[in-house]
Amino acid sequence: MNLLAKIYVTLKGSVLDPQGAAVTHALHALSYEAVQDVRIGKYMEVTLSAPDETRAHELVRGMCERLLTNPVIETYTYELAEVTL
Amino acid sequence: MKCAVVQFPGSNCDMDAVKALNLAIGESADIVWHTVASLEAYDLIVLPGGFAYGDYLRAGAIARFSAVMEAVAREADRGKWVLGICNGFQVLTEGGLLPGALRRNESLQFRSEIAALEVVNADTAFTRHYRAGETIRIPIAHGEGNYYADEQTLQRMRERGQIVFRYAREHNPNGSVDDIAGVINERGNVLGMMPHPERAVHARLGSADGARLFTAIFASWREEYAAR
């Protein structure tokens, strides 16, 4: 089966995000005073083929932990869905 | 002393490292391409500055999986000296040879200037020609040199003397925790630093303070070689 993994990578809560802080300031300057915090991350789409969903989950977690994120500073979530190519 | 300078696609301080080794200690280093599978012949391996694999994804993230990095890990295990400068430091943290990670500079700006560093640990093979507490001047040139490690890791590193260089008080250029500019592994044979000692080997370059890092490794090697 063919699957699409939508992977969201963010900095861990304990890690300062200077880009997010700069964007927060910019939004405040545009009068969006409602904004309390902005965290900037990365979004990736990985298309893959796997025999079943269980294996696909294993593959996605493996690639996230080995390459797509640095576990020292980042964390991730993902959504996985079957797609027709 | 046999020296290798690893060249990744995107390295750009490789020739500076070769010339610095030649000027500081009279050794001619080999440039070694990132596909090389063995570094057994070398006593010192330098991972130079630059933008290996374009710094895609994260600085050092892709370079750490190149064939040569398996060889670097193997030689580090054998106790060979490994020096990662700037991008080389990023590759070493990504590869788990050194603790922590390097984030985007807090200012979000690329900083290129001469930095004042405090030598925190002068009792390593790399820093024995400095005095503990001495201030040295070494250039920095990076956008992602903002060192991070969690508090537990930092405490462990402090206890073991693994913090080797700090930016001088009030002169932290990138937001690094604890003002950290360079760290060493527990065994004391793998050093990573954001500043560029290879760009500070002659007064005409603005500072000659980096030369002593190379003379120190050379002296360490001579002692070890004589003891064999």
Image (cartoon, rainbow, N blue to C red):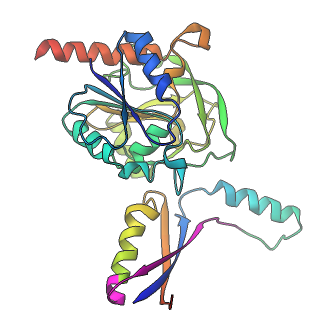
Q: Is residue B102 visible?
A: no
Which quadrant, please, contains the N terminus of chain B? top left
Examine the structure image and report whether residue A52 is included in the region drawn in magenta.
yes
Question: Position of B46 compared to B86: left or right?
Answer: left
Q: Quadrant of residue B213?
A: top left
**Which residue sits furthest left?**
B228
Q: Is residue A65 visible?
A: yes
Q: Is residue B24 above or below residue A71?
A: above
Q: Quadrant of residue B68?
A: top left
Examine the structure image and report whether residue B67 is included in the region drawn in magenta.
no
Residue at 25% over, 25% down: B43
Which quadrant, please, contains the C terminus of chain B? top left
Nearest the viewer among B52 and B139 is B52
Residue at 75% over, 61% down: A23
Which segment is the magenta one? A37-55
Nearest the viewer among A42 and B156 is A42
Residue B209 percent location from the top left of the image: 51, 14
Question: Position of B225 compared to B119: left or right?
Answer: left
Question: Position of B106 compared to B83: left or right?
Answer: right
Residue at 60% over, 33% down: B141
Q: Is residue A4 above or below residue A23?
A: below
**Which residue sits furthest front?**
A85
Nearest the viewer among B74 and A51 is A51
